[in-house]
Image (cartoon, rainbow, N blue to C red):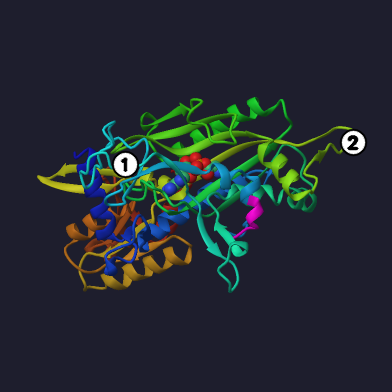
Amino acid sequence: MASGSDLMDRLVSLCKRRGFIFQSSEIYGGTGSVWDYGPLGVELQRNVKDAWWRSMVHERDDIEGVDAAILMHPRVWEASGHVAGFTDPLVECRNCHRRFRADAPELNDSGQCPVCGTPNALSEPRLFNLMFKTFMGPVEEDAAVVYLRPETAQGSYVNFQNVLTSTRQRIPFGIAQVGKAFRNEITPGNFIFRTREFEQMEMQYFVEPGTDDEWFEYWKARRMEWIQSLGVRPEKLRFHQHGPDELAHYAKTAFDIQYEFPFGWHEFEGIHNRTDFDLRRHQEYSGKKLEYVDPVDRDKRYIPYVVETAVGVGRTVLALLADAYREEEVEGETRVVMSLHPRVAPIKTAVFPLVKKDGMPEVARRIHEALRAAGIPSFFDDSGSIGRRYRRQDEAGTPWCITVDGQSTEDDTVTIRDRDTLRQERVNAGRVVEWVREKLTTA
Ligand code: GAP
């Protein structure tokens, strides 16, 4: 089994071959660190977002969803501290004008440029803001500058009072959001790990000050459970606490959930105690009261503390793909299989007639259509040898392949092959939908 950069190369190549992920604008040579999701990738991504939304919003009474706009009032980013503080220190080569993060491992004390090799060429570090800027309206002037949001969280904070009054929630309660964010990252890379355009799934949980440490522990545990419920192996997951020099400008405490990617242990989710930093600053900058008044004791008023859970869709997809990738010897041949959990697998079933005659295609088509009508994403394939059809579905991560063979037309049964165990079970054709449904609910 491959590991490290070899494993990443194989994963990237499988993602392209099977239609999970393509490089953006590939026919023009690609765009730096932007990726497109193909037919299988978009289904996997949707399943991840649906699983998150279900566990955060639909299965709870205390969390509401919002979908705020990407473009916000520019004062939002002054209040949030992003205009002043969302920066990386960069050095620039005076000869080739390339820029590097001041803490990049390829730099040394001599000031030599690691790309063009010019000695003493690097400037003093200067702060570079990671927010993308654009202009609102027809005139490109300073007064028209707006930013592409670098996090979805601010859209939840500025709607705190709107959600509170329209839903009559009481503290503690949360606001959940899934949406795009943009960062002009200096060192993007590792496929979809760090990109300039990405999607976040963030939840802001508003609590009474003094109860924040307890809620922080609660959310750490829930988020670790969630990623394991999608099938990621527990031994590949761990917590990492941020030291004082890692903490974001808004955080009192922060823990990452890290996954052991083929390129090492890295964050894929952050849990942050943001205190009352954001609401207090928005109250100050907007002049609008963002206090919570206790409905029982109306003399009790406070700006809530926030415990945030923040995870990238792409990072979750990458962790799932890396965790699912297996190479195995089967009957003297290497098979590549994506052991994705059935909840997130893009296609749940593939239906094959063994041969294109003797009524087998008709029976197979009927089963395929019954599965689709039941809302189970299914794929029909009648071309190539049965072995090749299985291999294609193994790489796509399809948990069950249903084959209609000679016996099917005699006794109305089909075989269902399990992707991981390779065991085959004979099931009555009329029971296939029920069989798959049961497996999906118990998986
Ligand atoms: N609202 C808090 C916040 O944005 P963050 O740790 O900067 O915190 C949260 O980001 C999550 O968003 C990260 O754990 C990661 O999963 C994802 N993320 C952040 N920057 C990313 C990037 N450039 N590319 C892909 N995902 C990113």
Q: Residue 281, percent across and down?
A: 70, 42
In the rendered image, residue 96, in percent from the top left (x then y), is placed at 27, 52
Q: Is residue 54 left or right of residue 409?
A: right
Q: Which residues are magenta?
A: 71-76
Does the residue at mark 1 contact the one at mark 2 (Cβ under 8 Å)?
no
Identify the residue at the far left of this view.
332
Q: Is any atom of residue 291 visible in this view?
A: yes
Residue 86 x %, y %: 52, 44
Distance of label 1 from label 2 (alpha carbons): 59 Å
- Front-lying residue, 386 or 35: 35
Amino acid of disc 1: Leu
**Measuring 39% from the left and 56% from the top, which residue is drawn there?**
346
Q: Residue at x 60, y 47 (%)?
A: 153
Q: Amino acid at mark 2?
A: Arg
Inspect the magenta stretch and tell me whether residue 257 lies in it: no
User: Along the polypeptide, which appears first: circle 1 or circle 2?
Assistant: 1
Query: Residue 348, labelled with which disc?
Result: none
Q: Percent from the top left, x then y, of residue 9?
A: 22, 48
Along the line of sight, the residue nearer the viewer: 358 or 79: 79
Instruction: Read off the residue under disc 2.
Output: 298
Neighbor class of circle 1 (other Cα within 10 Å; few <14, some 14-19, many 20+) is many
Question: From the Cβ of disc 1, is ligand 1 less than 8 Å away?
Answer: no
The answer, for residue 327, to whether it is visible in the render is no
Disc 1 is placed on an element classified as loop
Quadrant in which the C terminus is drawn: top left
Compared across the picture, whether 137 is left or right of 23 comes to right
Residue beneath disc 1: 122
Which one is nearer the viewer's eye here, 48 or 379?
A: 48
Q: Residue at x 59, y 67 (%)?
A: 136
**Number of dots carrying numbers:** 2
| Quadrant position of the N terminus in the picture | top left
Mark 2: secondary structure: loop
